[in-house]
Image: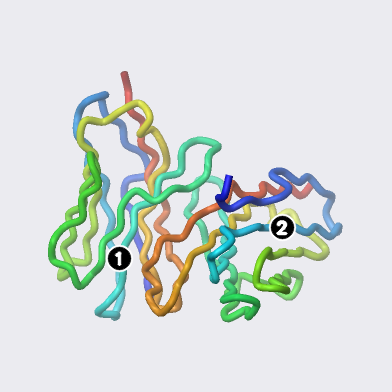
Amino acid sequence: DTGVSQDPRHKITKRGQNVTFRCDPISEHNRLYWYRQTLGQGPEFLTYFQNEAQLEKSRLLSDRFSAERPKGSFSTLEIQRTEQGDSAMYLCASSWTSGNVGNEQFFGPGTRLTVL
Amino acid sequence: AQTVTQSQPEMSVQEAETVTLSCTYDTSENNYYLFWYKQPPSRQMILVIRQEAYKQQNATENRFSVNFQKAAKSFSLKISDSQLGDTAMYFCAFIHLTGKLIFGQGTTLQVKP
């Protein structure tokens, strides 16, 4: 399967703990996006990378959130000192973009985070 | 700021019939792309159809077609010959010039046998 993969699929943690999610994009894709989706809502943009450079971060991404894409391949999203409001589905998507931002973004299955 | 609005939280349709999902958006950009994504229950999001704003012709993908009205900033999705597998949440999305997607709130579609 050469689609976007995410790990873990589910994560339950206690408030105050740190969590880290991983996303493996489609191998030839240079762009990688993180979105957050709460129940019954549309995804909201968090951040994106072009290769290893993080080019934009949403104001939704507080100081407790950090994302990396160290070698322009996989990416990690870390949440420090989790809060109950962080409970959501975290989606990763990737695309190939060479000037045309309208190319399809392929989504992974998501990581569902529950903060108790 | 760009916004996307889907005013129908839930819809239902009988199998084999046609249904239209509504979407409006707001932007000051002239060149952009619009998408409809499908998110089946407990499954990942997949692209249904894409429309380039500079193309006047409405996009079509098999049973799925759009009615794109640029001046009205309207982008509706028509599903013909609805199938049980079309049951899902449908999201209208606008792509920002940086490449990030801006989604609507979604419409839950139930196809009834």
Residue A74 x, y percent position in the rendering: 68, 63
* Quadrant of the frame with the N terminus of chain A: top right
Q: Mark 2: few, some, or many residues within 10 Å (few <14, many ≥20)?
A: many
Chain on which label 1 sits: B
Residue B52 x, y percent position in the rendering: 25, 67
Q: Mark 1: few, some, or many residues within 10 Å (few <14, many ≥20)?
A: many
Q: Is residue A110 above or below residue A53?
A: above
The residue beneath circle 1 is B25
Q: Are marks 1 and 2 in contact (CB under 8 Å)?
A: no
Of tags 1 and 2, the one toward the viewer is 2
* Residue type, numbered disc 1: Tyr
Residue toward you, B108 or A98: A98
Image quarter for residue B16? top left
* Residue type, numbered disc 2: Arg
Identified at 40% across, 73% down, the residue is A101
The residue beneath circle 2 is A22
Q: Is residue A91 above or below residue B29?
A: above
Say left or right for A87 vs B52.
right
